[in-house]
Amino acid sequence: MLCAEGYVFELERRGYIQAGSYVPEVVLERPEAVSQLHDEFVRAGTDVVVALTYYAHREKLKVIGRENDLEAINRKALQLARAAAQGGQLVAGNICNTWAYQPNDDKAAAEVRRQYTEQVGWAASEGVDFILAETIEYLGEALIALEVIKSFGLPAVINFSPIYNKSKDGHNWTEACRILSQAGADVVGYNCARGPDTLLPLGRKLREAVAGPIALVPVPYHTTAAVPSFQFLKRHDGQSAYTLGLDEHYIDRQSAAEFATAARDSGVNFIGLCCGAGPHHIRSMAEALGRTPPASKYSADFSQHGLLGTDAVVKDHEKQFLEQWC
């Protein structure tokens, strides 16, 4: 399954989301911009349309004073996703880290459960196919997400964000995924934080440890063994690249395609790209996986290029130019 993500960063680049808060108020203010990006990802070959409800929870909405718009943002985002999924794509409700969880804190756990219950409840009522819970850094929070999702009878894809070497509550990532899988998660894995080169090794270890479906959804940036997570990348001048200086670390579409095939060949079942992914990445990944999405109509053909081409018409034009000017 190929899943296009990265809506928040892409819409920030297009001028519809504010960097910093990264709250998806665009859903209400410019819904046509969200629909356009949904359509572009669908044309590029995604199998899943993810509702833009990432950070559409109470803790984040308080940051911009829009907590009263909570249900409106969630329902509108879900409806936009459903409207875009007209070619057999699955629709995913989306929940994420709440910023409210604390280990061994019953009050905090109750608040996380309440927030997830609100969002998953709206997603269920809007008819989503499954819930994608992502960028979670605590096993305890992931288990609450799983409990809530299953209480609504929905499949659960739950991805940790492996910024550090272990979860924030001290679990090895592979073990945390195994615990989630044994607890009933339908798909477990990782998203965000790491680029393809530093996420693939975690995925291969996970494939050996978990029998069920696994997911890898890296960020589209070059990360290294020395700097495995994009939150710690530097600009050329030594300043932090996160988040507005990441362009110099951006992977190209060929690297995205290479990741897709490497992930597939490693036994990964749910493949995608996260923060910063664009439709050109997803199209290249789809084509690398043997598909021909609608956007492939416009895939590159350099035989027609004025300088590099081999097409007969191009060569004839080149010959005429050379005869005239050289």
Image (cartoon, rainbow, N blue to C red):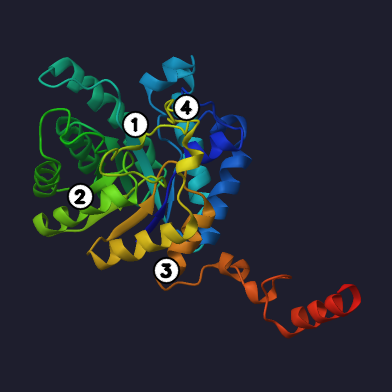
Residue type at numbered disc 1: Phe
Q: Quadrant of residue 115?
A: top left
Mark identifier at residue 202: 2
Q: Residue furthest front?
A: 326
In the structure shown, which secondary structural element does the residue marked by tag 3 occupy?
helix
In the structure shown, which secondary structural element does the residue marked by tag 2 occupy?
helix
The residue pinned by badge 3 equals: 288
Q: Residues within 10 Å of mark 4 (few under 14, many from 20)?
A: many
In the structure shown, which secondary structural element does the residue marked by tag 4 occupy?
loop
Give the distance between the C-alpha atoms of the residues marked 1 and 2, in whole angstroms. Answer: 18 Å
Between discs 1 and 2, the one toward the N terminus: 2
Between discs 1 and 4, the one toward the N terminus: 4
The residue pinned by badge 4 equals: 23
Residue 128 versus residue 224: which sits nearer the camera?
224
Between discs 4 and 2, the one toward the N terminus: 4
Between discs 3 and 4, the one toward the N terminus: 4
Q: Residues within 10 Å of mark 1 (few under 14, many from 20)?
A: some
Residue type at numbered disc 2: Leu
